[in-house]
């Protein structure tokens, strides 16, 4: 009866979770990064997306998933349906296929990483949660199905660069560890299992090599490293969490060393990225910190039930600490409230204005394609990118450089062909007649509409 009661509580929680997330998906307006991925997928072929991925610094798995919808001319909102379904499956696996305490399950379900951000905001982060949860559920039986398990890990490679540390930890403690044991004659796995482990290792290596080769090269100019207190505090929190996991390792006399290695490599790689590649810690990346703790807990509970039962309160404390140290709960609540009350992006508002008030104007100038791309799904008007001298759809292939955009704005008076045209800008430009200004949005991206006097 207790099992039946627990299942009822979890089922009710899951249904409520689906309803809340569905509402948040409906009210959420796609913004710049979401629409950018959609337009890339819609306008480019798969080989072109692979080549262009080095400028995006993202693997293309998310693009491949939305590919049939974008190519068929479907609404961009299908992205949100997909991310909603992926997160829903992840939540179901978490609730009904893991050994976490039911109270902790319900509390976690309605915080991060399940509610709103990975479900409503359609980006590749939802894939980390999806494949990560599958890996956690399979973790206990990974030796029975090593190829399938490794396949999930290899797919995780194609989700996002911030997942690569987690992939490295899993590969080291499973595939590489068992291969080394075999070389020294200490392996206890069967021949069939060992061949599966080797085959899985090959899959992971091929995936990693492909992604590294395709992403290696020139980067977008927005990928920069700078020192700020916020990023440094995040890095300190990662170090503290690694140290806390080592304390747990000492408590259980080294029994959970594999899981600690997985968590440690995940966090160390994040630190490496923040220090050498891209130091801006946006909310979606910040949530990966407690999400890795959640994966860590599930893995330990699945594979070390006896030890884990004695350390559950420490695991849950570590998880709560990881959330509070990064203020994820507060930021999540504020983000949801803002998205319900305000625009997430003001692009749709600008599109509605130009559709209703500029019926005869077929060509509109835009000064920054990376921002104005968000307007594209809501209007049939042609948007001409003055930076790249092309239709905004063609400027998808270019790399954003704000200095060059500002130079183009300053150069507007030298272009007679621009006179008598309307310009959409995210900058307030002096000396031009301001026709309309959009409302403030969560992203802080306000659009200005100008008429360039003849």
Image: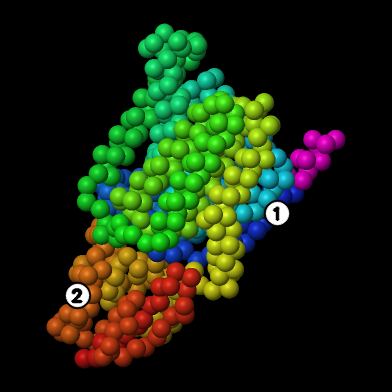
Colouring scheme, one of rainbow, by chain, secondary structure, one colour: rainbow
Q: Nearer the viewer, residue 65 or 265?
A: 265
Q: Position of residue 141 (x, y in %)?
A: 57, 24
Task: Verify whether residue 383 appears in magenta.
Answer: no
Are the residues flagged by discs 2 and 1 in contact, CB closer than 8 Å?
A: no
Q: Secondary structure at mark 1?
A: helix
**Depth check, front residue: 234 or 410:** 234
> In terms of depth relative to the viewer, which is nearer, 172 or 444?
172
Does the magenta stretch mainly form a helix, a strand or a loop? helix
Query: Which quadrant holds the N terminus?
Result: top right
Query: Residue at image x 72%, y 45%?
Result: 103
Above-or-below relation of 257 to 427: above
Along the horizontal axis of the image, is 311 left or right of 86?
right
- Horizontally, residue 322 falls left or right of residue 262, namely right
Element type at mark 2: helix
Q: Residue at x 24, y 65 (%)?
A: 401
Residue 68 shows up from this direction = no
Using a 10 Å C-alpha cutoff, classify the residue at mark 1 as few (fewer than 14 neighbours), some (14 to 19) or many (20 or more).
few
Up-down relation of residue 27 to residue 411 (above or below): above
Which quarter of the figure has residue 298? top right
Residue beneath the point at 52% across and 32% down:
259
Is 257 drawn above or below residue 346 in the view shown? above
The residue identified by callout 2 is 407
Image position, residue 378 (x, y; %): 43, 70
Could you tell me residue 400's position as x and y percent? 26, 63
Mark 1 lies on residue? 16
Cα–Cα span, label 2 and label 1: 51 Å
Find the magenta span and give its range: 1-11
Residue at 38 percent across and 27 percent down: it is 203
- Residue 28 % position (x, y): 53, 65
């Amino acid at each position: 009866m207790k099992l039946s009661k627990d299942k009822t509580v979890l089922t009710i929680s899951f249904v409520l979770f689906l309803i809340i997330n569905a509402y948040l998906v409906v009210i959420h307006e796609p913004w710049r990064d979401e629409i950018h991925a959609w337009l890339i997928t819609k306008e480019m072929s798969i080989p072109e997306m692979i080549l262009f991925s080095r400028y995006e610094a993202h693997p293309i798995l998310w693009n491949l998933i939305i590919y049939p919808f974008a190519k068929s001319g479907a609404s961009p909102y299908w992205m949100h349906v997909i991310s909603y379904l992926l997160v829903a499956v992840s939540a179901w696996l978490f609730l009904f296929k893991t050994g976490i305490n039911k109270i902790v399950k319900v509390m976690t379900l309605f915080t991060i990483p399940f509610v709103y951000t990975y479900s409503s905001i359609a980006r590749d982060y939802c894939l980390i949660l999806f494949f990560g949860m599958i890996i956690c559920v399979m973790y206990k039986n990974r030796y029975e199905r090593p190829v399938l398990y490794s396949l999930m890990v290899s797919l995780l490679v194609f989700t996002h660069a911030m997942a690569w540390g987690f992939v490295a930890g899993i590969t080291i403690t499973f595939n590489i560890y068992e291969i080394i044991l075999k070389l020294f004659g200490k392996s206890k796995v069967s021949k069939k299992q060992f061949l599966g482990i080797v085959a899985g290792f090959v899959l992971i290596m091929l995936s990693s090599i492909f992604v590294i080769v395709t992403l290696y090269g020139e980067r977008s100019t927005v990928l920069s490293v700078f020192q700020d207190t916020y990023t440094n505090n995040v890095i300190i929190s990662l170090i503290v969490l690694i140290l806390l996991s080592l304390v747990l390792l000492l408590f259980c006399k080294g029994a959970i060393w594999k899981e600690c290695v997985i968590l440690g490599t995940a966090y160390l790689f994040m630190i490496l990225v923040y220090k050498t590649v891209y130091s801006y810690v946006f909310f979606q990346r910040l949530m990966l910190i407690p999400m890795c703790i959640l994966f860590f807990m599930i893995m330990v509970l699945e594979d070390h039930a006896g030890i884990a039962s004695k350390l559950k309160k420490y695991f849950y404390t570590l998880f709560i600490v990881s959330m509070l140290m990064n203020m994820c709960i507060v930021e999540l609540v504020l983000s949801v409230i803002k998205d319900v009350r305000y625009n997430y992006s003001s692009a749709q508002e600008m599109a509605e204005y130009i559709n209703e008030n500029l019926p005869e104007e077929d060509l509109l100038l835009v000064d920054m394609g990376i921002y104005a791309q968000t307007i594209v799904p809501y209007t049939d008007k042609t948007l001409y990118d003055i930076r790249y001298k092309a239709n905004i759809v063609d400027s998808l292939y270019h790399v954003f450089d704000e200095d060059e955009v500002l130079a183009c704005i300053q150069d507007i008076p030298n272009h007679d062909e621009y006179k008598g045209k309307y310009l959409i800008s995210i900058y307030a430009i002096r000396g031009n007649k301001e026709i309309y200004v959009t409302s403030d949005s969560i992203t802080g991206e306000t659009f200005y509409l100008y008429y360039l006097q003849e």
